[in-house]
Image (cartoon, coloured by chain):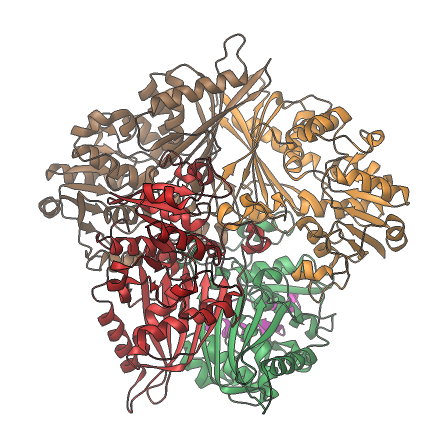
Chain colours: A green, B brown, C orange, D red
Amino acid sequence: MLRVALIGSTGYTALEVARLLTAHRGAELTVATSRSDEGKPLAEIHPSLAGRCDIALSQFEPDEIAKQADVAMCCLPHGASAQSVKDLVDAGMRVVDFSADFRLSSVELYEHWYGVKHPWPERVGNVVYGMPEFFAEQIATADVVANPGCYPTSAIMPLAPLVKAGLVDCQDIIVDSKSGVSGAGRSPKLGTLYCEANEQIAAYAIASHRHGPEMQDLIHRISGQSVEVLFTPHLTPMDRGILSTIYVRPTVAAGQTPVDIQAKMMDKLRETYADEPFIHVVDHLPSTKHVAMTNHVQMTVRVSGTEEAPGRAVIVCAIDNLTKGASGAAIQNMNVMFGLDPSEGL
Amino acid sequence: MLRVALIGSTGYTALEVARLLTAHRGAELTVATSRSDEGKPLAEIHPSLAGRCDIALSQFEPDEIAKQADVAMCCLPHGASAQSVKDLVDAGMRVVDFSADFRLSSVELYEHWYGVKHPWPERVGNVVYGMPEFFAEQIATADVVANPGCYPTSAIMPLAPLVKAGLVDCQDIIVDSKSGVSGAGRSPKLGTLYCEANEQIAAYAIASHRHGPEMQDLIHRISGQSVEVLFTPHLTPMDRGILSTIYVRPTVAAGQTPVDIQAKMMDKLRETYADEPFIHVVDHLPSTKHVAMTNHVQMTVRVSGTEEAPGRAVIVCAIDNLTKGASGAAIQNMNVMFGLDPSEGL
Amino acid sequence: MLRVALIGSTGYTALEVARLLTAHRGAELTVATSRSDEGKPLAEIHPSLAGRCDIALSQFEPDEIAKQADVAMCCLPHGASAQSVKDLVDAGMRVVDFSADFRLSSVELYEHWYGVKHPWPERVGNVVYGMPEFFAEQIATADVVANPGCYPTSAIMPLAPLVKAGLVDCQDIIVDSKSGVSGAGRSPKLGTLYCEANEQIAAYAIASHRHGPEMQDLIHRISGQSVEVLFTPHLTPMDRGILSTIYVRPTVAAGQTPVDIQAKMMDKLRETYADEPFIHVVDHLPSTKHVAMTNHVQMTVRVSGTEEAPGRAVIVCAIDNLTKGASGAAIQNMNVMFGLDPSEGL
Amino acid sequence: MLRVALIGSTGYTALEVARLLTAHRGAELTVATSRSDEGKPLAEIHPSLAGRCDIALSQFEPDEIAKQADVAMCCLPHGASAQSVKDLVDAGMRVVDFSADFRLSSVELYEHWYGVKHPWPERVGNVVYGMPEFFAEQIATADVVANPGCYPTSAIMPLAPLVKAGLVDCQDIIVDSKSGVSGAGRSPKLGTLYCEANEQIAAYAIASHRHGPEMQDLIHRISGQSVEVLFTPHLTPMDRGILSTIYVRPTVAAGQTPVDIQAKMMDKLRETYADEPFIHVVDHLPSTKHVAMTNHVQMTVRVSGTEEAPGRAVIVCAIDNLTKGASGAAIQNMNVMFGLDPSEGL
C-alpha cells in the first residue's frame, strides 16, 4: 500500500485528494499537515470526510513525514511551495507539487509573472510537467512532478497536438475560459462569497492571468512551436468545471471546406488520444457537467465559414478543474510514478 | 424631496436601500457613510450603482449628517448601532434602525440574547417596531423605528393575527425557515463562500437563534398572548428570500373538519390584511421566487388530518429577506414617518 | 463478474447506476433498455458516459435480458414497474425495483395512495424493503428487493431506532424535508425548468405526499410501533441531496435535562449504526453537501428547551437523494444479494 | 394613461413587461392574451403577480384589443408574430414586436436564417430597429418597432460606435457570449431543466445562431460598414443576464501603445453614450450581476499586448437579457413612441 502525505490540507484540492484516495485500492492517506489547524481531525476541516477518514492534522516536519509516507501531495501556494518541496525531496520523498513553482521553463519567466524570488531556481526547467499524456516516461522516474494548472490543462490538451501537426496558425490563438468558483480557493474573500459569485458571470485578469504564459510555454515544449495565446478567464456560477472555448485559424489547403478541415482536426485529436483512458474526442458539444467529479476530458472542434471561405475553428474543451485540473491529475501522476494502473482511483 | 442618509453603506441592506431610492419619487440619497471606505464613491463599493448614483462615502459625523439629511437609515451591526442612533437623534434626526438594538421589549432579554451591555437602555421598550401593518400610527410620529428582523417578519405576519384570534395553540409553534445567503451579510466568511453554500442546505443555530425570542416578543406585543416558538433557520442556496414553514395546532371546535379550519384561518388572515398593499393571502403554495426583489409577502394555510381527526395546520409564508425583510420595510417605514404614500418606491 | 441490466435507462437514477458501476470491481453493465430510444448508445442519452460505456439501448425482452444479465435494476415508474418486475422474475432474474410498487405493506394502502390497481398483488407485503441496515438477511436471498424512497430513507434511518427504543412520542412527529431538484425526475415539466426552480424554495404536497405513508409503514415494520408522521417536502435549488429536519417530542424521565436527553438519543443512534459503513452519527450539523455524490448518511440530534422544561428534539439527517436515496442503495442491495462486499463500488 | 396590451402572455418576456408596468406611472396593462390559457387570471400563470395584477387572459381579437389598448407588446414566436403584428396594425394599433420577424434588412436573409416564408414581406426592411440610442427619431413615429434580440444588444452597443469610427478591423470580430437560462424560454425542454442546466456551462449553435447575422446587419446599418462576426453563445447557470466578451483587432497608428488604444476606444464609447441614461462605460470589469433586473448596460475595453506590439482589444459588455435585452427595451421604445420620459418605469 502506497502511503500518501497531504501537505497543506485545508483547501479544496486537498479535500479532493482525500476524497479520491478513499476509493483508491493501492494508496492510502497516512499524513495530513496544516500550519493553522494542527491537532484537529481532518474531518473537522472537511465534514464530508466524517466517519470516512480518521487522520489528525500535524505540523510540517519533513523527516517525520518521510517516515510515514512514500509520496507527498504538496497543496501549498506558489512561492511557499518550492521550499517545502525542496525540504521533502531532501528528506528522501517523491513529490507532486500542485503549485506553479516548477511548471515554467525559466526562472525569468517565473519571477516576472509571479513577482517573487524563486527559492530553488536550480530545479526550474528540469522538473517534469505532470501531464502523463505527453510525459509519462519522465514522470515514472521523477522525484518532483509539477502538477499542471487547471486552465492550462483545458487549453494544452486540445491545442498541443494541433499546433504540433501544423494545423493552426500559432500566432492567433484566443482561449476564452469559464471556470467554476472552486478554482479561486477556499480562503474567504469578497469576490467568492455566494452572493457575489452567484447569478453572475464576469471576466477577470484579461490578458494578464498567469496561466496564459503557462499555456504558451507548455504548448511550445510539447510541439516545438512558439505560440501566442490571448487568454481570458471568467468566473462562472458553479462549484466545479472549466469550459474553454478556443478560437484558432486553421491552416487551409486549396479547396478545403470547413467540413474537411474539421474532420482533419478531429482525426488528429482522436489519433493522439486513442489510447488515453481520460481524453475523449466527442461529436457533441461538451459541457462541464459531463465531466464533473471525474478525471475525464471531453473536447470537440467546429469549423465556421462557407465552402468557399472557411473561417476560424472553434474548439471546445471541458474538464473538472479540481479533478483533471488538479487532484485527479495528481493521483494519475502518482500512479505513474509508482507503477500503479494509471486509472486507479479515478 | 426627503433627504436620506445611509449609515454603514457597504453591506447588502445598504445597497438595497440605495437601489430602492433610485426609483423613489419623493426621497433621495444625500449622504452615505462608511468607516472603512471614506472618500470612495459608493458605486465603487457597489458596482451595480455605476452611473446611477454619484455619492462619495463620508465619515460618521452626526451634526454634519443632520444638515444634509432628514432621515437616517442606520445599517450598523447590533451593539454598535444603538450608540449611533442616539447620536443621530441627539443631532435632531429621525432614524430607521436596521439592527436588533431596539426591537425587544426589555433590556434583560436583549442583554441575555445579544451578550452585550445596551448603550441606550432608557429607550428599550419604548421604540416602535417597524411593521406598519400593526403600528402605523406610532411609526408616523416616531423619532426612532426599530426595523424588523427578516425571519421574524416571515413568522409574525401570519402568526400574530391567528394567535390574537385564538385560532392556534400558543404553546406549540414550530417555525422552520429557509433563508437565502444574503441574510448572512457581506463580510467574507468561510461558511458563506460560494463553494460552501452552493448545492447545499443546512440547519444552523437550532433553538438558539436570536430571532426566536424576537418572534415570541412581538407576537405577544401584537396579540396579547404569550407564545412558545421553536425556531430552526436553514441556509439555502439562493441569493434572496425566506420561506417559513410553520407548524401549529389549530384550536378545533367539535365537528370541524380540516377544510373548515383552513377556511377559518385563511379568512382571518384575509380580513386582517385586506387593506394592506404588500400582504397577499393566496391559494397557491408561495415560493421565494414569487416575491424576490419586491416588498410583497405571500402566505397560505393548509390543514392536515382527516375529517374525524383534524391535524396540524401548516402555514407557508414567503418574503424577500432584503426587501420586506429589511430595506423595503425601512422605506415603507420612512414613507409612513414622513407622510408619503406608504407604497412609494416599492 | 456480476452482469447487470438497467431497465428504463433515460432518467437520473439510471445514470447514477451506470456511473457507480464504472467504478465497481465485481459488477458490470451488460444491458440497458429503453422504450423510446432503442438502438441509440446509452452515452448519447447521458453524455457524461462518452468514452466510458459503449452499451446501446435495447427493447425490454425479459428472456433475452435473462441470458445477458444476472440482476436487473428496474428504474421504471410505479404501476409500470410491477409488471416488468414480474416478467423479469418469471424469466429467472433477481430484481432491485426502484419504484414504490412493492414498498408498502398492503395492497389497500398502495392502491389508496397511488390510485392504480396493483398488477401483482400477491407479492405486496412479502417483498423485502431494501435497507440493508435493517433487513440484510432477507435481502441476501430475495428475488425482488423494494428499493427505498429517497425521503423515507432520510426519515426512517434516524427515526426507526429512536421509536423502537421508546425515546420519542410516536404520535407527534413532523418531518420537514428539503430535496434537490433531481428528485423530480428528468421529464421536461414547467416546475423543474431551471428558471422556475433556481433561486427559489417552495413546499409542495403538504401532508399529501406518498412518501409520508411509506415512512409510517416502515418505521412500524422496523420498530413495531405505530407512528403518525406529518410530512412536508420542499423543492430546493440544488441538483442533489435531501436534508430532513425532524421534530419529535422526547419521552422525558423526571430530572432529565436537554443535555441528558440529547446524549441518550445520540447514543442509541451510535449504537444502532456502529458497524454500518455508510451511517454516521455526527456532532456537527450535517448539510447535503457533506454527502453529495456518496452513499453516506450523516445525522445528529439537538434537544431544545431549558433544564427545567426540556422541549422538542430536532433531528437533522442528510443524504444524497440519487445515491443513498436511490441508486447507491440499489448497488448496496445488489452487493448483499450476491454476497459481494456491501461497500463495493460505493 | 397609456393602455398596454400584452400579446402572448405566458413566457418570461411577457412577465417582465407586466412586472415593469406595475411601477410605470404613465402606462398600465389593460389586456393580456393567451391562446392556451384564456379565462385564467394572468397571476395564475405568473404567481409573482398575485395581488398585484387582476387581468384575466383573453383570446387574440385585434379589433377588441384596439378598443381597450393603445399599444401592443407582441411576445409571440417568430413566424407567428408577423401575422399578428399585421392584424394589430390593420386594427389601428401601434406595436412593439419582440420577435425577429422585422429585425433583418431583407426577406432573403430572414428566410435563409429562419427557414419560414415571411407573412408580411412588404414591411421587411422598413421597420425601425428598437434601439433608441440610435433610432429614437424613427421610433417616435413608428407604427411597428422591431425590438432587438438579446445577444445582438450586448454586441451592437459596444461594437457599432467603434466600427463606425474606424477603430477596429471589421473582418475579424469574435463575440463570445454567455447567457442566463431565461433566454431559452419557458417551454419545458430537456436542455433547460434545472438538473441539466445547473452546475454546467456549454456552448451551443457555434457559428450558426440566428443572432449572428442580426449583429452583422445592424452594425452595418448603424455604421455603414460591412462586418464579419463569429458568434458563439453559451448557456450559463443563472436566471438572467448576458455577458459578451468581444475580441477585435484595433486599427493601430504608428507608435500607439495598448494604453493609447484603450483610451481612444473608451473615449469614443463615452462620447457616444454621454447622454444615454442606460449605457455606462465603466472602468471596472462588468458582470451580469451589476445589471440584473435593470435596463442598464455596462461596458469596458481592455487592450492586450506590449508597448511595441499592441494586441487585440477585449470588450466586455453586460446586460440583463430580459430587461435591456427584451422587455425593458420594449418599455423604453414605448416611452419614445408615445412621448413619455424614455426612462419612465425603468
Q: Is residue B43 left or right of residue C245?
A: left
Q: Name the quadrant containing residue C141.
A: top right
Q: Residue A192 location, x and y as percent?
A: 42, 58
Q: Is residue C132 magenta?
A: no
Q: Is residue A75 magenta?
A: yes
Q: Residue A318 location, x and y as percent?
A: 58, 68
Q: Residue D68 location, x and y as percent?
A: 33, 41
Q: Residue D259 location, x and y as percent?
A: 29, 80
Residue A325's place in the image compared with D309, above or below, is above
Residue C160 can be seen, yes or no: no
Q: Nearer the viewer, residue A63 or A97?
A: A97
Which residue is painted at 54% across and 18% down in the image? B258
Residue that extends furthest to the top in the rendered view of this protein: B254
Q: Which residues are magenta?
A: A67-96
Residue C28's place in the image compared with C93, above or below, is below
Q: Nearer the viewer, residue C282 or B160?
A: B160
Q: Is residue A346 left or right of residue A14?
A: right
Residue B318 can be seen, yes or no: yes
